[in-house]
């Protein structure tokens, strides 16, 4: 397949790019540094600097839209919120506008979102039919998803990837936690009872390929493992597998003072299930946290 990928140089995009190339697909990546793309993949991948470099004659069987500034990379100032919005919503709108003008439209658009769509919902079990708690992360994800779903009006099949925390050794949250736990500084956040909905990198990649190649799938899909855990359970499991102690804890008030509004990412939570993905016939290879961590950390 001919595939267009945005966000192809991040943690998830890089892993997905390697998998797609291994599967024999032809890739074009939108990147601010197309020369890096060319060098990294030995000329096997076409790199474009911006969406406006696409023409009406370009055709792709599938478009995978993963672009977006890191939600937890910087404090949520008004300027940062604008960057989070434009890098997600505005870019997706530009992508759909290009689809509107091309001579031949793609068959499918897979567009990123996040389980932040649900907002902070303590212990309630959530699936794709659940109602959100109206807060900043919900508003951001709602507009992000709306901009992608607009492609359905063009006859393009759309799958929204409402993604949890992706666990992989070489990126994301797990990479940041490993040195902390390595120095016996790991511990629960707040009371540790907030729910943590995660997915192993292997299963995330498999789910993206499953949705891309299954023409009967469309709409919103939770990309989370079927066995969410609490923050405390996650902390204890990771410490156990690394043979490290995790007796420290960070009080909620400290996180709120240090992080402000962004502290909801650590103190809030969602107990999310991948109902529509399972109903579509997808099988998780790493449904339990212990098994996922063992595989992703190469612990046998």
Image (cartoon, grey):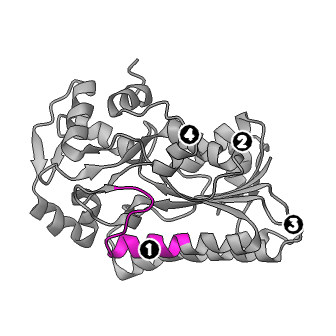
Label at residue 104: 3
Q: CA distance from mark 3 to mark 1?
A: 30 Å
Q: Which SS class for mark 2?
A: loop
Task: Point out the tag, 3 or 2, that comes first from the N-terminus.
Answer: 2
Q: CA distance from mark 4 to mark 3?
A: 30 Å
* Residue closer to the observer: 94 or 33: 94
Say above or below: 133 vs 168: below
Q: Position of residue 125 (x, y in %)?
A: 31, 54
Look at 51% across and 51% down and name the residue there: 276
User: In the rendered image, which residue does mark 4 sit on?
Assistant: 282
Look at 34% across and 34% down and name the residue there: 289
Q: In the rendered structure, which segment of residues is drawn in magenta? A: 126-145
Say above or below: 38 vs 227: below
User: In the rendered image, which residue does mark 1 sit on?
Assistant: 140
User: In the rendered image, which residue does mark 2 sit on?
Assistant: 41
Q: Which SS class for mark 1?
A: helix
Decide whether residue 132 is among the magenta residues.
yes
Q: Position of residue 12 (x, y in %)?
A: 54, 48
Task: Point out the tag, 1 or 2, that comes first from the N-terminus.
Answer: 2
Q: In the rendered picture of this protein, how many numbered marks are placed on residues?
A: 4
Front of the two marks 1 and 2: 1
Front of the two marks 4 and 1: 4
Whether residue 91 is visible here, answered yes or no, is no
């Amino acid at each position: 397949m001919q595939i267009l990928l945005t966000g192809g140089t991040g943690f998830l995009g890089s892993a997905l790019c390697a998998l797609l190339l291994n599967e024999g697909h032809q890739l074009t990546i939108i990147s601010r540094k197309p020369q890096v793309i060319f060098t990294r993949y030995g000329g096997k991948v076409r790199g474009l600097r911006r969406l406006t470099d696409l023409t009406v004659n370009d055709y792709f069987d599938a478009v995978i839209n993963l672009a977006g500034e890191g939600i937890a990379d910087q404090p949520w100032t008004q300027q940062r919120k604008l960057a989070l919005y434009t890098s997600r919503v505005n870019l997706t709108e530009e992508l759909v506008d290009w689809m509107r003008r091309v001579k031949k439209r793609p068959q499918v658009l897979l567009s990123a979102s996040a389980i932040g769509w649900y907002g902070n919902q303590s212990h309630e079990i959530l699936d794709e039919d659940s109602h959100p708690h109206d807060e900043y992360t919900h508003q951001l994800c709602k507009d992000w998803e709306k901009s992608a779903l607009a492609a359905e009006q063009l006859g393009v099949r759309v799958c929204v990837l409402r993604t949890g925390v992706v666990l992989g050794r070489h990126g994301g949250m797990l990479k940041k936690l490993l040195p902390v736990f390595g120095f016996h500084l790991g511990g629960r956040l707040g009371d540790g009872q907030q729910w943590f909905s995660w997915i192993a990198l292997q299963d995330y990649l498999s789910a993206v390929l499953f949705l891309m190649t299954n023409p009967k799938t469309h709409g919103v899909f939770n990309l989370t493992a079927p066995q969410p855990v609490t923050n405390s359970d996650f902390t204890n499991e990771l410490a156990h597998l690394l043979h490290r102690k995790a007796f420290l804890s960070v009080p909620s008030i400290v996180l709120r003072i240090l992080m402000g509004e962004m502290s909801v990412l650590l103190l809030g939570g969602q107990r999310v299930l991948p109902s529509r993905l399972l109903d579509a016939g997808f099988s998780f290879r790493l449904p339990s946290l212990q098994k996922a961590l063992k595989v992703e950390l190469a612990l046998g």
